[in-house]
Image (cartoon, grey):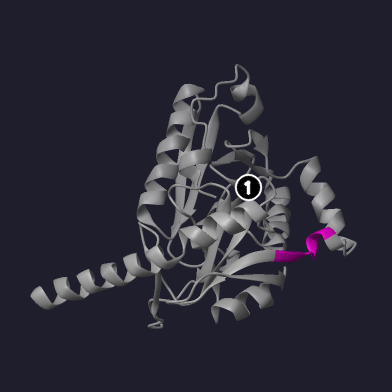
């Protein structure tokens, strides 16, 4: 989800200090520097608006959205206790339910909770307990299939139905996955190879703040649950056009410009 459109930083509640305590920790994660700056900015605005003192700020920058790669999140969980941590969105922690269960276990031991300022609720609450029980019972709501748009370099988007599993998603992008977002949209996520540029995969689409390399797919985004959702028919149509012929042309022009600049220098 694109936090630019979702964060409500000026929300004020008279009892936030009672709810969160007088002192909080801030946590941010992204592979994009501008996104990190944006998250910290609005977390600070939230704190200033509600008279909350900031104890520390933890940031994980670069790396895939997996707990094992988030060195500072693990430090936060290991070195703190009896405190609440503010985040801009649930998916800043992880989009993997097993990771979330691991984080919840560590939080429970040290009496830590995360507060999502976008949805104005604690991450590990009764709703999370319901999701956890569904997962333990093998509920098919968490194993559903997804309707996505699959996009290869220089090709038009293709509608596909995939299994909602990590293995299936990795297969589509030929490696470890990364979630990124469009700056002008908050209803979908782009799932791509998190090492596309390092591996020298071919440029696929220019999305404004980045050029995605290698195959990727578009999926609906559920920021509250941190789970993927099937694209609606309206979204299918909208993003088929968005990443259509003009997008291919624009990307080729962008890459030619980059090549010309490199040759010039």
Res 101 quadrant in image: bottom right
Q: Nearer the viewer, residue 23 or 253?
A: 253
The residue beneath circle 1 is 223
Q: Looking at the image, which residue is at 67% across and 76% down?
A: 168
Residue 71, percent across and down? Answer: 50, 63
Residue 80, image x and y in percent?
Answer: 58, 47
Residue at the left extreme of this rendering: 264
The reply to whether the magenta stretch includes residue 144 is: yes
Boundaries of the magenta span? 141-146
In the image, residue 120 lies at what x, y percent?
63, 33
Give the position of the C terminus as an image quadrant.
Answer: bottom left
> Could you say where residue 114 lies in the image, as x and y percent from the top left?
63, 43
Q: In the image shown, does 185 or 167 lie closer to the viewer?
A: 185
Confirm whether residue 175 shows in the render.
no
Q: Residue at x 48, y 72 (%)?
A: 194
Location of residue 85 with respect to 61 vertically, above or below: above
Residue found farthest to the right: 137
């Amino acid at each position: 989800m694109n936090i630019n459109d979702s964060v409500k930083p000026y929300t004020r509640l008279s009892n936030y200090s009672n709810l969160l305590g007088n002192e909080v920790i801030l946590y941010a994660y992204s592979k994009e520097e501008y996104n990190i700056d944006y998250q910290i900015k609005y977390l600070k605005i939230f704190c200033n608006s509600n008279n909350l003192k900031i104890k520390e700020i933890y940031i994980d920058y670069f790396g895939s959205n997996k707990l094992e790669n988030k060195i500072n999140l693990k430090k936060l969980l290991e070195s703190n206790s009896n405190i609440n941590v503010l985040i801009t969105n649930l998916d800043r922690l992880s989009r993997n339910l097993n990771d979330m269960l691991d984080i919840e276990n560590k939080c429970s031991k040290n009496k830590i909770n995360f507060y999502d300022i976008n949805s104005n609720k604690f991450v590990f609450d009764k709703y999370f307990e319901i999701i956890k029980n569904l997962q333990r019972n093998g509920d098919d709501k968490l194993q559903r299939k997804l309707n996505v748009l699959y996009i290869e370099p220089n090709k038009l988007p293709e509608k596909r139905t995939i299994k909602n599993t990590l293995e299936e998603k990795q297969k589509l992008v030929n490696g470890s996955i990364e979630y990124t977002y469009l700056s002008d949209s908050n209803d979908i996520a782009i799932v791509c190879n998190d090492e596309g540029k390092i591996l020298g995969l071919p440029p696929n689409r220019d999305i404004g703040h980045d050029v995605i390399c290698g195959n990727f797919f578009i999926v609906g985004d559920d920021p509250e649950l941190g789970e993927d959702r099937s694209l609606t028919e309206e979204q299918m149509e909208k993003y088929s056009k968005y990443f259509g012929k003009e997008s291919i042309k624009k990307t080729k022009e962008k890459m030619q410009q980059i090549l010309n600049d490199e040759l010039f220098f």
